[in-house]
Image (spheres, rainbow, N blue to C red):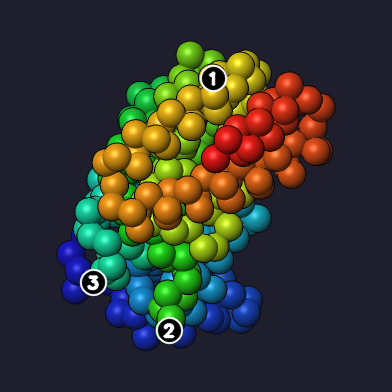
Amino acid sequence: MKEEILYQEQELKLMLTDIKDRTVRLQELDEERVIRSMLHHIGSTDPELRDQLIYTLFYRFIIEDEQLTNEQLTDLFNTTLKYHLFHGIGEAASDTVFTRSFSTLLIALIVHQDRQQGFLSEPDLEMLKAKLLAYLDCEIDTRGYVPTKGWAHAIAHVADTFDELVLHPSLDETEFGEILEALWDKVMFPSVYLHDEDERLLNPIFALLGRGMDEHEIIVLLEGLPARLSVQKQQLEPEQYWHVVHNLKTFLKSFFVKLYDVNRPMLQTAVFETLKQI
């Protein structure tokens, strides 16, 4: 769609505020133009527009009111994966992170709705899994809250999307392992996580356990952590190494606490024993 027929940020902001306040309905406006404009501005650096209006209203349109058709959702899904998910990937401190991060949240909403409606094809979901794994591997902007611009939180948001994907009935148990390892790798990223990324990364891991993944797969990874950390000590600069240690300790402590809510004593013991060795 040509950019000149999209709403600009301020015009869109006023329109979405009216929709949010329920003084006007989406159907009373040029619906397609509004939706396209929301997607175009999904990475706005205006936190009110991006977070409180665009994301909040996508949630309402997709989950609460189910106002968007399966065809519209499929179109949003394909457009987001093609143009938004990898926008500016590899940049560590630029505003492009907002587009990537909030794109993953939109995908999470669509996947959640697809679990009820089943409008995405099997190839769609295979492509999504491959792209999410690639995105998680490539994302290096780990900022949480950015002053004046609000939440970036790319790692937490993609973890939320994996949580939705893991809960999707089309995901086969043979695919659990690669998702687990991808999430595990991101725990050991050499940049300090400050905004509960550890807990968000744990959510899809617990979802995998809930779907029937053998906890022994996690125990094997836990047992390998001290040796893996030793290798990283040789490869990384000291400051980066201690960032990894910090992330790993925080993750394992959160893991240990979260295991109190489930009956998995063997796994809890393995987490505790690993934590003592680090």
Give me the disc on residue 148: 2
From the viewer's perspective, is residue 155 above or below residue 220? Answer: below
How far across and how far down the image is residue 127, in percent?
33, 30
Q: Secondary structure at mark 3?
A: helix
Q: Quadrant location of residue 25?
A: bottom right
How far across and how far down the image is residue 196, in percent?
58, 57
- Amino acid under label 3? Ile
The answer to which of 26 and 263 lies nearer the viewer is: 263
The answer to which of 115 and 148 lies nearer the viewer is: 148
Q: Secondary structure at mark 1?
A: helix
Q: Give the foreground label among 3 and 1.
A: 1
Calculate the distance from the C-alpha at mark 3 to the C-alpha at mark 1.
Answer: 54 Å
Q: Which residue is mark 1?
A: 220
Q: Quadrant location of residue 8?
A: bottom left
| CB contact under 8 Å: marks 1 and 2 | no
- Amino acid under label 2? Thr
